[in-house]
Amino acid sequence: MSDLATQITENVTAVRGRIAEAAARSGRAADDVTLVAVTKYVGPEEIRALVEAGCTTLGESRPQQLADKAQAVAGLPIRWHMIGHLQRNKVRRTLPLVAMVESADSLKLVEAINRIAGELSLRVPILLEVNVSGEEAKHGFAPDAIEPSLAELAGFANIEIRGLMCMAGLDSGLDGARREFAAIRELRDRLRANCPEGIAMDDLSMGMSADYEIAIEEGATIVRVGSALYERISP
Ligand SMILES: *Cc1c(COP(=O)(O)O)cnc(C)c1O
């Protein structure tokens, strides 16, 4: 194996171990948590190493980069997740490439995904992104904006709503992140208790390199980890 592939394999093994331990602390099995390997910092060589190491669910935050990388490694068994802001004029090009849009961050975007998925004869799994920290610069539904929209969301036939996604606030620190993750889990539980038919509120995508273990302890079923997979363990 190349040095790069060895390093990535070691990092993947370490992250998977920590995922399993955090899952155990929350009374769950390791395979209740899906690792999305975020590839926004890296290229095809690292992506091949990730797939070799068993990471086949990958995340990109920009539609153009997702399209470029998906093409560069076409043929590999990869499930791409869109995890960043998706402009409505990029929806048509992006939907055929992805297994999930985690970052459905407004009703208008969800409407566009539903309409275009219909035109393309696709059924697209999505998560509703929640702006849990309330930061102006962040996209996402306000936490109290989802419940009033549930009936309308349930009417969209070409999407499958699977749950919620969030990012901890930039200045929240680890304790703040834990509180935000707990708040999103509680929101998910409340929504699930009176969800219309056709909407599932099972998935919670939360946690990145700095806070994925905390997120799992607070109920994450999907973690999106980037930089921790590329750092050098040994000099
Ligand atoms: C970049 C990114 C990640 C991964 O961040 P790391 O801190 O590098 O693990 C996760 N989620 C989203 C939405 C991102 O843009």
Image (cartoon, grey):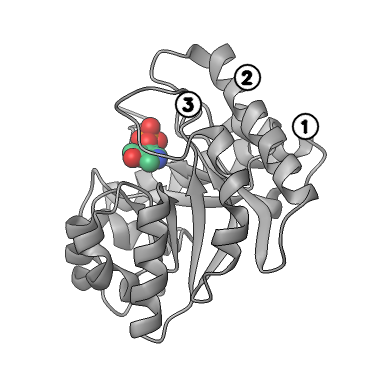
Distance in Å between CA atoms under marks 2 and 1: 17 Å
Please, what is the three-letter code of the amino acid marked with disc 3? Ala
The disc, 2 or 1, on the residue closer to the chain's N-terminal end is 1
Q: Position of residue 58 (x, y in %)?
A: 40, 57
Residue 168 tag number:
3
The answer to whether mark 2 and mark 3 are in CB contact below 8 A is no
Residue corresponding to mark 2: 179
Say if residue 59 shows up in the picture: yes
Please, what is the three-letter code of the amino acid marked with disc 2? Arg
Looking at the rendered image, the disc whose residue lies closer to the viewer, 1 or 3, is 3
Q: Position of residue 76 (x, y in %)?
A: 35, 75
The residue depicted at 55 percent of the width and 14 percent of the height is 176
Please, what is the three-letter code of the amino acid marked with disc 1? Arg
Query: For numbered disc 1, what is the local secondary structure?
Result: helix
Distance in Å between CA atoms under marks 1 and 3: 21 Å
Q: Which quarter of the picture shows residue 50? A: bottom left
Residue corresponding to mark 1: 25
Looking at the image, residue 95 lies above or below residue 134: below
Asked if ligand 1 lies within 8 A of label 1, the reply is no
Asked if ligand 1 lies within 8 A of label 3, the reply is no
Residue 115 tag number:
none
The disc, 2 or 3, on the residue closer to the chain's N-terminal end is 3
Q: Nearer the viewer, residue 185 or 215?
A: 185
